[in-house]
Every structure is written in structure tokens, then in C-alpha cells.
Image (spheres, rainbow, N blue to C red):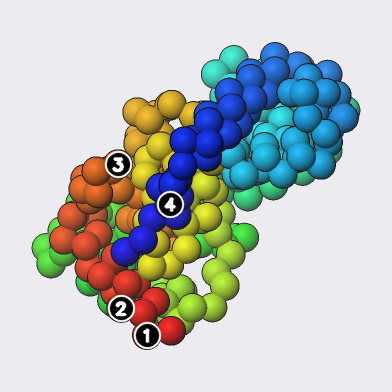
Amino acid sequence: MSTILKPLPTLADLDERSADYQRMAGALAWLGDRWRDRPSLDEAAEAAGLSPFHFQRLFTRWAGVSPKTFMAALAHDEARRLLIDEDASVLDAALDAGLSGPSRLHDLFIAQEGVTPGDARRRGAGLELTFGWAPTPFGKGLFVLAPRGLAGLAFADEGQEEATFADMHARFPAARWVRDDAAARAAALGAFSGAPTPLVLIGPPFHVQVWKALLRIPKGATATYADVAAWAGKPGAFRATGAAIGANPVSFLIPCHRAIAKDGRLTGYHWGLGRKAAMLGMEAVESRAA
């Protein structure tokens, strides 16, 4: 299995990458201080000492998202904090997050989490989730479907179904859960046929950024936790990134199994190291056969 970022062969390459890192660390901090003002690409590029084209390309390579998307994630983070932690109204949260009004906040939450601000604030209350069990290449799978797509995929060894369901239910405790094994089997056929599967990522903003970063790792490859942290816009936040990876609700399709330690160890996996090894092994065989 190969890693995404290959070793750099010369000191000149290392010098260049180190300089790029310093620029991007500074750019992340600069945008973090000024996102409410919605600086333009030209302004951000000038602050980093780069052309707009070079800045956009370099920032996207390091953070995994464009500067505009990164600022949207910061606005989402602040709005979510206001709604949930401070019990602000939707209007107040929108305005305090630098948005024009509730409709923009609605669009932002749909883009970031696939749920409305009201759904996020209620912690799943009023949201109907369909769940069921279906066979998968990695044992029995628990599928959780939201109105807009797949919100959860977990695995259970024989006799562990109740614990697996409790683990998933705790992620959306206030939602209304409706069992439908036929819908789960249909979801399993889609998920493991290679067909595109709409995903609904419900969680804290940084977790969502990490889960989106994991989607950058192609089948048959692996990446380190440091890679994923950089792509999520938080270089060096290894512990927080590891926690977000461990909280991934949509196993396999959001490929947290492809994240490994810097020294190549598989490290932990929420559904068992044996299952993680099986996933990586299957993908390696499929990649070689392709």
C-alpha cells in the first residue's frame, strides 16, 4: 500500500515544502482572524505574499478546501456554537456569524452537515432516521438513513448488535428511529457496488472537515494522521484529528480505515483492527487488479 505524500528526494524540495507550510500556517491564522470580514481571494493572497492563482492552488493543496470554503467552515463553526452552546436564535446566530440572514445560515448548514440549523440545534429531535441491518463484506452492517442520504454505517460481530446500535443511537439521541431492514439492504447494495452514495455528515464542524478530508484518500492508498490534519485546515492538531477520525459515523465510505500512523502502524479502529486490516487488504487487491 502506498502513501499519498511520497518522500521528497532533495533538500531543495524539503526547503520549498517547509516554506509552503509556513505560508499556509500563516494564511490559516490570517483567515481565522478575519473571516467575519469575508476577505477576497486577492486580499488573502497579498497577505501571504503570493499571486491569487498560486495562493488558491497552494492553499487548497494544504487545507483540502478552497479559502472560500475554509471561511464558510469557520462561519459554520461559530453559528453552530451560538445555536447549541449559547441557545441563540437562528437570526442572531446568522448575523453574529457574519451572514445576511436565516436563509444564508440554512444554506450553510445544508452544505456543511446536510441538516438544517433547526435540526442541528435540536440534536436530532424532529429528524427521522431509518435504520436496519444488512450483510456486508465485513460482517453485519448497521445502516442509518437520513432524508438526504446515508448518515451512519457501523459493523457488528456476532452477538454485538445491541452494543453497536447503542453506539450509533448515542450519536443522534433525540431523533426518531424507524427500523427498515429492506431499506438497509438496498443501501448496502448501493454502498458496496461502487455506485455513488449520498452522505449526510452530521457532527461538529471540525469533525465534518476531517471526514471530508478522509474522502481525499483514494482506494488502495493510505495517509497519515498528519496529512489528514493538514487537509482539514489544522496542521499539527493530531489529537483532535484522531478523535474526529474515531468519531466517523459512516465507516468504510468515509475511509477512516485508510488513516495510519506515521510509522506505518494501523493503530486503532472503532470497529476492530482486524476489520481495518481486511478493508485495506481488499482495497489493495482490487487496486492491483484494476
Q: Residues within 10 Å of mark 1 (few under 14, many from 20)?
A: few
Badge 2 element: helix
x and y, in percent, of residue 192 in the image: 41, 77
Which of labels 4 and 1 is toward the front? 4
Sequence-wise first label, 4 or 1: 4
Separation of marks 2 and 4 at Cα, in angstroms: 21 Å
Q: Name the disc covering residue 6, or none.
A: 4
The residue to which callout 1 is attached is: 289
Sequence-wise first label, 3 or 4: 4
Which quadrant, please, contains the C terminus?
Answer: bottom left
- Out of 55 and 215, give the one closest to the viewer: 55
Which of labels 3 and 4 is toward the front? 4
Looking at the picture, which amino acid does disc 1 mark?
Answer: Ala
Separation of marks 4 and 1 at Cα, in angstroms: 22 Å
Residue 207 can be seen in this image = no
| CB contact under 8 Å: marks 1 and 2 | yes
Which residue is rendered at x = 87% and y = 30% of the image?
Answer: 42
Q: Name the disc covering residue 285, or none.
A: 2
Badge 3 element: loop
Sequence-wise first label, 3 or 1: 3
x and y, in percent, of residue 49 in the image: 77, 23
Looking at the picture, which amino acid does disc 3 mark?
Answer: Lys
x and y, in percent, of residue 67 in the image: 73, 35
Q: Among all residues in the image, which is located at the extreme left?
A: 159
x and y, in percent, of residue 225 in the image: 37, 40
The residue to which callout 3 is attached is: 262
Sequence-wise first label, 2 or 4: 4
Which residue is rendered at x = 37% and y = 44% of the image?
Answer: 224
